[in-house]
Image (tube, rainbow, N blue to C red):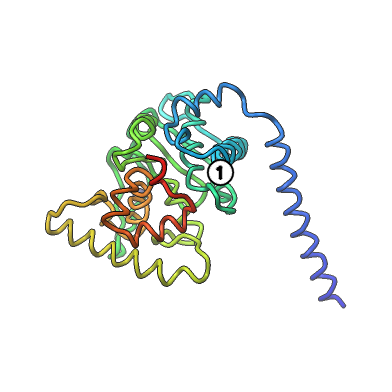
Amino acid sequence: MTAFLILIIIVLVLVTGIYYASWQNWLILRKPLPQQWMTFLDRKVLFFNKLTEPEQQQLKDLVQLFIAKKKFHGCGGLVINDEIRITIAAQACLLLLNRSTGVYPRLRHILVYPDAFVSNQLQHNDDGTMDDARGGLLGESWHFGKVILSWDDVKRGVTNIHDGHNVVLHEFSHQLDSESGSANGAPLLHSNSYTAWAQILSEEFEELNADFQQHNESVMDYYGATNPAEFFAVATETFFEKPRQLQKKHPELFGVLRKYYAVDPTGWQ
Ligand SMILES: [Zn+2]
């Protein structure tokens, strides 16, 4: 009997939690998007105008939820404004279109510096040592609740969407990767997708490493050869910014990313 009561209480808590979250989202989304936000989306976020109308509506809802739930912090003298919030939120939420994943549920804080910043994070190396990752960084994604970005590089990414470099797509794909419990290049997938994902991404990772060693040309940035987590982040940037080249040169990788991200950016060119 006691076990039955505990089960009932657990179910009630879970159901209440789900309804409370839905009610919170409803409260946020019932307010119309401010006109100024629409102007930023239209004029500053080049990806936005490539989307279909239903995708644009989805993105607007995701941006509204993102901005309501995440806290932006200006660092190094930068004052956060709507342009900064919209530009970051819209690109981060591009990775969530057509997927029922929630809006980065573990992420709480976005720290924005005016330009490249110095990290205090210790870098864990494969041999067990740690380095103090000094040097100018464009972005950084922490496992638990934090992304750090350079505003200069965010602007550079959003104004050139065909060069394969986008710090927001890069860092937020690390956030998706972390949702599986560790950042290892395998985000949360449908249970029957892990085998194909592991096989294709590890083969492509090895190929990028070989291209790097042999100085061959590659559609992906060689930074992706650093480790599987960076490979997934760089492959994400390439998927959204150079989709046709990726599809032509790496059709299997393009295929698993199209399935995961549930969009086909080849139609956005
Ligand atoms: Zn990275």
Within 8 Å: ligand 1 and the Cβ of disc 1?
no
Q: Quadrant of residue 75?
A: top left
Residue at 52% over, 34% down: 72
Residue 132 vertical position relative to residue 86 in the rendered view, above or below: below
User: What is the count of numbered marks?
Assistant: 1
Q: Amino acid at mark 1?
A: Arg
Q: Residues within 10 Å of mark 1 (few under 14, many from 20)?
A: some
Which quarter of the figure is the C terminus placed in?
A: top left
Residue 54 vertical position relative to residue 35 in the rendered view, above or below: below
Q: Position of residue 213 (x, y in %)?
A: 14, 59
Where does label 1 land, which residue? Answer: 108
Q: Nearer the viewer, residue 12 or 263?
A: 263
> Along the horizontal axis of the image, is 219 left or right of 27?
left
Which quarter of the figure is the N terminus placed in?
A: bottom right
Q: Position of residue 168 (x, y in %)?
A: 41, 40
* Numbered disc 1: secondary structure: loop
Q: Nearer the viewer, residue 179 or 37?
A: 37
> Along the horizontal axis of the image, is 97 left or right of 203?
right
Residue at 59% over, 50% down: 102
Q: Is any part of residue 131 visible from this angle?
A: yes
Q: Position of residue 64 (x, y in %)?
A: 60, 35
> Along the horizontal axis of the image, is 36 left or right of 117?
right
